Image (cartoon, helix red, strand yellow):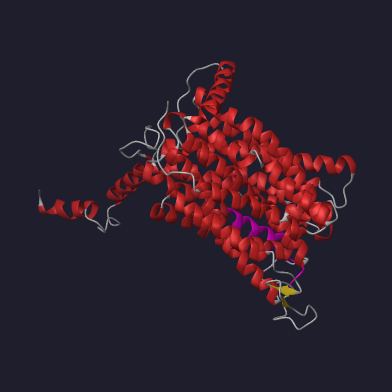
Amino acid sequence: MKPSDEPASRGFDAPGGDVSGNPAIAAVAEAEGLARWMRSPPGVSATGDGIASPLGQVSWATFEWARNPYVLLITIYLFAPYFANHVVGDGVRGQGLSGAIQAYSGIVIAILAPFLGAIADCGGRRKPWIALYTVILAAAMIPMWFAMPHSTGMNLFAIGALIALANVAYEFSAVFHNSLLPTIAPVRGVAGLSGLGLALGNAAGVVLLLFMLFAFALPGMVPWSFLPAHPLFGINQALHEPERLAGPVCAIWLIVFSVPLFLFTPDRPSSNTPLFQAMMQGVKSVIRTTRSLKHYRNVGAYLLARLFFNDGMTAVLVFGGIYASSTFHWGPIPMLIYGIELSVFAVLGGFLGGWLDNHLGSKNAIFVSIGGTTIFGLLSLTMGPDRILWFIPYDVNGPHLWAAPFFSTWPELIFLGLVNFIAVLITAGYANSRTMLARIAPPERMTEFFGLYSLSGQSTSFLATGFVGWLTLYSGSQRIGLLGETLFLVIGLVLMFFVKEQRTEAI
């Protein structure tokens, strides 16, 4: 090698070498860096397939960035409280009706989700199904703009039907999206990628909540110079348009950020089985799998446990925003700030879920995350504008802690602290529960079991959410009604004692 060649060679090969002075070498280095993102690493995935490239794996997680704002803006922090308190017009009745909507959509999901998973197993490909339900979800969210205050009759029915359709499409997209995870990542990478997806989903929620707050809710309400003088695009706050805009905004976000999944994440090859034949094979496979659960007792025991604790977590999400807005009389501005704060902590929960899983194992991680959600959920119910932890009275007419028109009392601040823990732990719980199935289900029938996994999370949602709704209306108290979600969390944790963390072989 000539001396003149040596510096250039060192600049490219040596760690930290300076290639900025040689455009050709810099271009090669940049191309090599991009190639590493596009190149599949050696080894096999959890199902024995080839591992996806780093870009393909990140694109899988990015779909959570695209999809999860629906949960945060529509079902928890912005649209759902607006629906209960203004579209229906009463917090107690609104919480009860929200429970009924969740119950009806849960029945549809319970019936169809496992069959869809089995059909995908027979047909091979997942991404066409993800595309279908992504389009349906977006189409259901856009008309939420027309949800007017104090709706009655067919108008109220139409809004409820849109919410139910969106719930179904969201969950069905999850069946196929979840089933891709073990096919693209190695066994030790499943937990981290699952946690990354949930963290990105909550981060996206933070971005959109901030946008809704600064673009539509705060302008004209607070004298901050960096805000627009009026809401953008002529949005009218008095007509609750910031809340109604949540649906169209989430739909646009979903469509745009779903693209990387379809471009870069590899799908399983098609089996070339005709659709009707795949459907028949899928139905038979589900029936066979359900009957053979006695041979998959460990997986069956886990799915039964998850059936309860996941339903309890769903109830926490569905009713949490409604309860907070009704109890503390929070409007769109405090609810958006509330959602932003909780979403930031939920991002931490996605990473905590992966850390707990890798250090404690999936089963112990579930005990930590779901048990913690239960404890802090109960503590949050002891808070109110006039009380702290139930037994400590608070003078609602006393001086506020500061002049801000929101979060200016001790009950509000302590309540926020409690629900921050819930946000961290419940996100970790979703990551841990998904990873648990990927570790114990037989690889050959992974998608089918993920269909049953969806069933275990949704098939009793008409019981949990319906029970919370009924208990709310019967007692006339949102607080008493929410004790129903605690019941399902506790039952799920008890059943987890009968689950072993070990891979089941296919029969």
**Relative to the observer, which residue lies in front, 166 or 374?**
374
Q: Left of 99 or right of it: where is 507?
A: left
**Relative to the observer, which residue lies in front, 290 or 269?**
290
Q: Give the range drawn in magenta.
A: 203-224
Residue 170 falls in which quadrant of the image? top right
Where is residue 139? Give x, y as percent.
70, 38
Where is residue 436? Give x, y as percent.
47, 44
Among all residues in the image, which is located at the extreme right?
153
Q: Left of 252 or right of it: where is 54?
A: left
Q: Left of 491 or right of it: where is 152?
A: right
Asked whether 241 falls inside the magenta stretch, the response is no
Query: Can the viewer see residue 332?
Result: no
The prevailing secondary structure element of the residues shown in magenta is: helix
Residue 85 falls in which quadrant of the image? bottom right
Q: Which residue is drawn at 60% across and 53% down?
A: 490
Q: Residue at x 26, y 58 (%)?
A: 18
Q: In which quarter of the image is the C terminus?
A: top left
Where is residue 367? Give x, y as percent.
50, 54
Q: Is residue 380 above or below residue 304?
A: below
